[in-house]
Amino acid sequence: MTLPKVVDPSTPKDVLEGNYLWGGVLHDHFGHFLVETLGRIWGYGEIPGKIDGVLFLRKRPDASSDGKAVRWHTAENPFLSRFQEQIFTHLGIKAPIGIVSAPTAVTKLWVPGQGFGMSRMTTGTPKFRAFIKEKFARNISPEGPERLYISRSAFGARRGGIIGETIVEEQLKKSGYTIFHPQQEDVETQIARYKAAREIVAPDGSALHLLAMIARPDQKIAMIKRRSSSAAGGIENHLASFSGTRPLVIDAIGENWIRSDRKRVDRFSLATLDLPALGKQLADAGMATNKGWKETSEASQRRFLKDLEQSSKFTFRPQSQRAPDALPKGIVASCHGIQVPKSFAVGQKWLVRKINNGRYEKEEIAGALHLVKSMDRVLECGAGIGIVGTTIAHNCKPQKMLSFEANPNLIPVIEATYKHNKVDHIISVTNGALLSGNDVPESVTFNVSKRFAFSSLDTPKRELSEQITVPAYDYAAVKADFAPTVLLMDIEGGELDFLEGADLSGINVVVIEFHPDVYGMDGMSRCKQLLRQAGLDPVPRKSSKFVWAAQRDN
């Protein structure tokens, strides 16, 4: 992992003249955008005079800032997603939206108090509620059915949900409900449907935060809990405080199912429901018929769960089944469905915790899991301790994977991890440095550090243990022989030289970590430029300032 460079706030990179509003943190997640990003936007209606811009920080570093102090959202250089842009528009925000990524001086910056947010703040302050009521979506007319079920079934298991939700949908159709998948529609359509509906049923989730912004006291709203957590309470309070009427909250959870890479019930969990109990509560509220709500058989639940597991690349365990108190003998950590054998390289407690929490090379793994497909051939430069490669081989099951690792001490560690997780028929590792360009030598000097992550071709500034000679391999020859479609790269600063000389034709996906501490911000910008010139652009929400999951636009 590369930590961001510490900057001196006393030397601003840019100065903004004018009148600006501080917006806070810009979240890309739909629900967190509504609940957290909009928390200070009420100040837009309070500031006297023209507002020259609304400034935010990103939750994660901006993948495309390229060193600019402030990046403004424009038609030519956009960074807001479609839903973000639409929501700002329907709030009446006409000032430019900017992302600050470097110390910036502002002549006048208005900082409103937080009027809305998580936990106790989901009720919103009176000023925030008044701003939303007065400004939000005033020009969108109701359009749609009177009975609406807001479904999560199209998500599969990617974002948590209800096992067998299609049964709930079929039952509600019998009571005249239209099944609605909000993520498939624009914000205007979602709001029009919510305004038109007289009765709404939905699992707890982000869609209900948008509903709460425009809900009326005459609407009947039932929220079905899909996980045993406090999150539903926040949604309930949001609906009640903004609409004036508390929703019906139905807890018919029979069992929570925890995803294999998580430790407890959370937003990624699944739930089985007591369907007769669900039907009775809806019927008692006059929102559905009580007929036909039959208990789902164990065989049907297993079938639904199997389908969800196959689509998500994860497995799930029931909450009632305790997680193992201890890993198998010789295993020190687990993550993403794989196990990590004990070795000298995985001895530090902080590293074990990081692996178990799913935070080890989190961004690279998330990007690769999102982009690598079963027909791919994956070339990995910098295998490390083998966790990234093993995770991709285990979960994505590509045709073949070939890894290179220059540190000879790590080869037995990597091979043991492959073998233990039974992916050694998919992935293999070669000891050596993979180099691009003309006249690749037979060997190069490699700097081995006490901590494996600091080892590199460049002379490290800390913890240098020894310099050794390792074999060098010609990327062009390997590419011609192996025919990779995916390139994974984490080589501690060697990526700039590699990209300068590499032919990326035929490579459809690149997941790469940048190391500006080695070659500076200009070097990182050059890496990104080379990738773009090769037709590889960062995938939104899977890329950050220091890690790109880039894909060719076919």
Image (cartoon, rainbow, N blue to C red):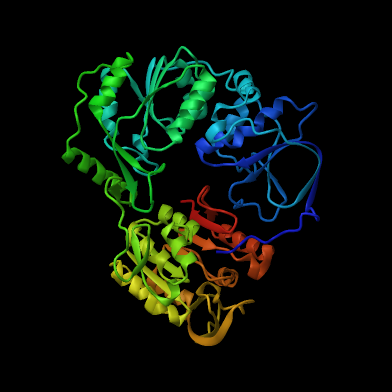
Asked whether residue 277 appears in the rendered view, the answer is: yes
Residue beneath the point at 25% across and 28% down: 275
**Front-most of residues 231 and 134:** 231
Is the residue 390 above or below the residue 552 in the image? Answer: below
Asked whether residue 185 appears in the rendered view, the answer is: no
Is the residue 180 above or below the residue 138 in the image? Answer: below
Is the residue 303 above or below the residue 92 in the image? Answer: below
- Residue 442 left/right relative to 94: left
**Front-most of residues 447 and 180:** 447
Q: Position of residue 99 (x, y in %)?
A: 67, 44
Based on the displayed image, in which of its 4 quarters is residue 67 positioned? Answer: bottom right
**Front-most of residues 393 and 76:** 393
Q: Position of residue 300 (x, y in %)?
A: 19, 38
Based on the displayed image, in which of its 4 quarters is residue 482 positioned? Answer: bottom left
Q: Position of residue 10 (x, y in %)?
A: 80, 55
Q: Position of residue 452 (x, y in %)?
A: 50, 75
Is the residue 523 above or below the residue 110 in the image? Answer: below
Quadrant containing the N terminus is: bottom right
Residue beneath the point at 65% across and 66% down: 523
Q: How many marks?
A: 0
**Front-most of residues 115 and 512:** 115
